[in-house]
Amino acid sequence: MNHYFFQQNIFEDSLAINPLFFKKIKKVKLQKHKEVQTSFWQLLDPDLINEINEYLRFYFLNIAKELGKKDYKIESTWIQKYNVGDYHNLHLHEKDKNSYSFILYIDGSPKSGTTRFFNLGYPYISLYELEIKPQKGKCVVFLGCLPHESTPSKDNKKTIISGNIKFV
Ligand SMILES: [Fe+2]
């Protein structure tokens, strides 16, 4: 019997918390948009971007190895903060096979909104669902075209760094 299957990847790990770095991220002034506060449409300080990249480098290289790739490129980075009632509608990022996205939780509590991932084709097809709870230092890397959403927060703690990366 042959067994064929298609696989989509989601990686999760808890990274060492660097209190000064995390504090600096929480202080970044963000613009308020409809659902959430985000830096998505603003330019972040290049030094801060470098610091973020350095912090994530070892973890991303490990994932590259897992995927049989040599390296990666960070294509975009943004910071987002969720206050009470803030959420992020169902969406997806880049559609390329080697395009991944990441979420690093800078802060969060059990009352903060969760990140819910769904199978490709959702909401037309509903097969699998995975819920990730925000926790300081947790970092999730996932295939960029996986549909995902953030459920409404019940506190003002959830802060994330998110972005798109390409494995090469
Ligand atoms: Fe997203």
Image (tube, grey):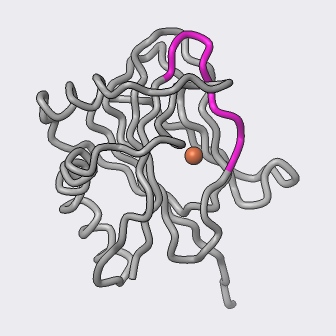
Q: Is residue 63 left or right of residue 110?
A: left
Q: Out of 7 and 2, give the one closest to the viewer.
A: 7
Classified by dominant secondary structure, the portion drawn in magenta counts as loop
Q: Quadrant of residue 29?
A: top left
- At a point 45% along the width and 11% down the height, the residue shown is 156
Q: Is residue 34 left or right of residue 139?
A: right
Question: Is 88 part of what is drawn in magenta?
Answer: yes
- At a point 51% along the width and 14% down the height, the residue shown is 83
* Quarter of the figure that contains the C terminus: bottom left
- At a point 38% along the width and 22% down the height, the residue shown is 108
- At a point 39% along the width and 77% down the height, the residue shown is 67
Residue furthest out toward the bottom: 1
User: Image height check: is 162 above or below 20?
Assistant: below
Q: Out of 159 and 1, give the one closest to the viewer.
A: 159
Residue 47 location (% of width, % of height): 20, 48
Residue 3 location (% of width, % of height): 66, 83
For the record, the magenta segment spans: 82-91
Residue furthest out toward the right: 124
User: Image height check: is 9 above or below 113?
Assistant: below
Residue 128 location (% of width, % of height): 68, 50
Q: Out of 9 and 29, give the one closest to the viewer.
A: 29
* Quarter of the figure that contains the N terminus: bottom right
Q: Is residue 41 left or right of residue 157?
A: right
Residue 33 location (% of width, % of height): 62, 26
